[in-house]
Each structure stands twice: as structure tokens, then as C-alpha cells.
Image (cartoon, rainbow, N blue to C red):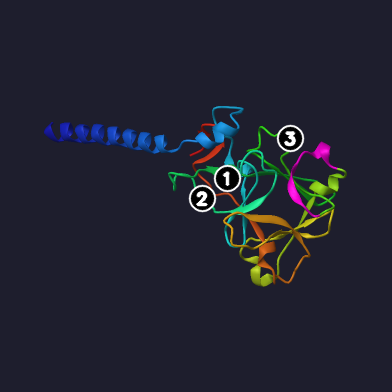
Amino acid sequence: MERLRVSLYLMIVLSIFHTNFDGANATKLKSDKLCSQCSNCESKQCPASEAYPHMTAFDNTLIAGALQSDFVDSDDRGVYSVPDIKGGESEEYNAYFGWKSTSGSTSGYHRFSNYMDKCSGGQSYLTVDKNKKVRLRSLSSLESLAEADWKSINPPKKLDHQEVRFWVSRMTGKCLTVFPGKKIKKVVGVAECKFDGSNVNQLFAFRFHYHKAFCCCGVHNN
């Protein structure tokens, strides 16, 4: 009987500890910066994050548009390589949902839209214009839908095991590229493709392992 009481007591203590521990972790995950820029939220629960993976560069930095990172503000239409921060690992920065991909089975091209960009009036598609400038825009604003079309090309065999690939613009025929520099936020544009892998800044991967990532103001997954 005494042993049963001790066991029940321990179960209660562990239950209280677990609840408090989870609560303490939950209070750390705040999205004040996101909410101050875009409070739109379609539900109180995030969809499956696997449908909105993150794009990463060859050096594992995050490829982010508006609100996909605390380093990119809502009114910034550019696309950047920024520090890759996992949810819950930092008290200063959060993680967010990534890109939605749609593809035309006949064309072989993909289009990417920024899941987080709910306050931009549809200016959420990864595009490149005739001046080779990569930015987020709405499909209705484009001179040609080719500006939003990207084709996947596999890398050389020596790099194929890293799940990276080239993304070639249908508009320009050039490859999505991170332009190197000393700034923490590096610009993403397009450049002549180096399919031999000599420019690793043209190689990108999609990652599905993000947890504790916000999908909108105040709501994150587990």
C-alpha cells in the first residue's frame, strides 16, 4: 500500500513538472515582431509544415522572403540568404514556415510562393524580371508568367548525395544564385549557370525538419 502511495505521488509530481516545463517553453515562443507587421491568421492551428518546406543554400543558410525570417521585414520584396535559426533555439529570433510549391506536370516548371506573406496582397511568388532582379511579386503583376517559373536541374554526381539542385529561370535561362558578401543578409539573384558545380552558391535544397515554427501571428507548430 505504501509503495502504491509513493508511486502515485511520483506520478503527480512528474505530471506537474512536465506541465510547468512545457508552459515555460511555450512562454518563450513569442512572435511580437511578426504580429506587429502582419497579424492575419487563417486558423488557430498550423497546417502540416511538410507542405511548406524551407529552402536552404549550399552552406545551410536559409533562403527567405518577407516574414520567413526575423531578418526580412514584411515590406521587403527581396529574397535573401540569412542565418538558419531553428524554433526554440533562440530567445531573440523565431523560425517560420517556408515555401509552397506548385508544378505544371506538362511544363516541368515549378512556382514557389511564400507561405508567411499573408499581408502582401498576393505579392508572394518567387520571380525574376527581365532585368534579372529576384523579388516577391503577384502573378497578376507579371509581364509573363515565365517570370515565376523555375526548373529543377540535378547537380553533378559528386554533389547529388547532398539533396541539392539548381533552379533555372524560364524567363532568363539563368540560375538562382546567392551573391556572396560580408553582410549577414546576402542577396539572392540569378547568374549564368555553372552546371559543373563550380559555383556552389547556385545549389539549393528543401528541408522538412523544422519544428516550433510559426505559421502566422501567435501560432506555431510543435
Residue labelled with disc 1: 69
* Quadrant in the picture for residue 121: top right
Identify the residue at the far front of this view. 183
Provide the residue span drawn in magenta.
132-142
Point out residue 29 in the picture as x, y percentages from the top left corner: 45, 38
Tag of residue 85: 2
Amino acid type indicated by mark 3: Gly
- The amino acid sitting under disc 2 is Ile
Distance of label 1 from label 3 (alpha carbons): 18 Å
- How far apart, in angstroms, are the residues tagged by discs 2 and 3? 26 Å
Sequence-earlier tag: 1 or 2: 1
Disc 1 + disc 2, Cβ < 8 Å? yes
Frontmost residue, 121 versus 113: 121
User: Considering the numbered disc 2 on the image, is that residue within a helix, a strand or a loop?
Assistant: loop
- Seen at 70% across and 34% down, the residue is 120
Label 2, residues with CA under 10 Å away: few <14, some 14-19, many ≥20? some
**Residue 173 % position (x, y):** 83, 59
Between disc 2 and disc 3, whose residue precedes? 2
In the drawing, what numbered circle is on residue 122?
3
Asked where in the image residue 115 lies, by quadrant, the reply is top right
Residue 134 located within the stretch drawn in magenta: yes
Please say whether residue 64 is one of the residues in the magenta stretch: no
> Which residue is at 47% across, 35% downward?
30
